[in-house]
Image: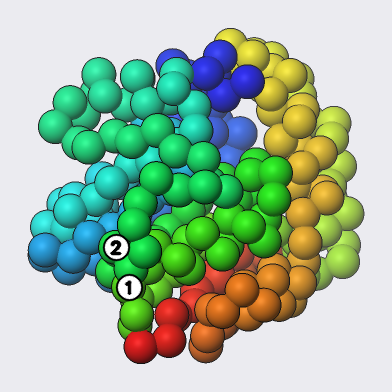
Amino acid sequence: MFDDVAEKYDLTNDVLSLGQTRLWRKEVAKAVAARPAQKILDLAAGTATSSQPFAQAGAYVVPCDFSLGMLRVGKQRHPWMPFTAGDGTKLPFKDDTFDAVTISFGLRNIQDTETALRELHRVTKPGGRVVICEFSHPTWAPFRTVYTEYLMRALPPVARAVSSNPDAYVYLAESIRAWPTQPELAALMQGVGWQRVAWRDLTGGIVTLHRGFKKA
């Protein structure tokens, strides 16, 4: 499915989010706080747009994705980056490899959320950190109602106008509605070993940043 939307994926996301994706990426970069010589795993990196801030900070970043179509487009745009094909439930990396692991708008698309969280924990060095940026649930009830209506009614026709595979975005709308709440995701993270788990809502809870640390 994601292979079919790779070419216009970044453009479509910008349109559907009314430009908010750029703000969200900046907040992820701040939360990850990549430093020179650190190793960063960017899971579900797609075309590696999300990976660029970490590379610009001097870190060694590995963009990893399940979609070969996304990786091909990313490699054409950023041929110097070490793109890696990988399943989020069985990552192709050794234990204790990365100083930080991050995933933006991809955890929701991995079939087994708990296994993916456990795999991210496994490949993180002791004392390392995780940053998860994902669509979530607005905290103000009236706004939540308006947002849900947008997802199910406005998003599909907009996607048909700008995307090569609008059905993929109908699936995305449904998956967002079914996603765990902020406290529920935090509990899943704690359950697989992440410590000092916290979250921060962005844009009224449309998106939430979850963070955690691996015991040193």
Residue at figure coordinates x 57%, y 62% from the top left: 117
* 151 vs 138: above or below: above
Question: Residue at coordinates 49% horizontally, 27% vertically from top-left?
Answer: 67
Of residues 30 and 58, the one drawn nearer to the viewer in this rendering: 58
Q: Secondary structure at mark 2?
A: loop
Horizontal relation, residue 34 to residue 190: left or right: left
- What is the three-letter code of the residue carrying label 2? Thr
Residue 172's x, y, as percent? 71, 35
Locate the N terminus and report the quarter of the image it occupies: top right
Residue 104's mark?
none
Query: Quadrant of the image for the C terminus?
Result: bottom left
Q: Where's residue 54, x and y in %? A: 24, 55
- Residue 24 visible, this angle: no
Q: Earlier in the sequence, mark 1 or mark 2?
A: 2
Where's residue 62, x and y in %?
28, 46
- Tell which of 30 and 112 is nearer to you: 112
Residue at image position (77%, 66%) is 181
Badge 1 crowding class, 10 Å Cα cut-off, few under 14, some 14 to 19, many 20 or more, is many
Q: Which residue is mark 1?
A: 125
Considering only vertical position in the picture, is 135 above or below 166?
below
In screen coordinates, is 211 left or right of 36?
Answer: right
Tell whether label 2 touches label 1 (CB within 8 Å).
Answer: yes
Look at mark 2 in the image and give the residue it sits on: 97
Residue neighbourhood size for the residue with mark 2, other residues' Cα within 10 Å, grouped as few (<14), some (14–19), many (≥20): some
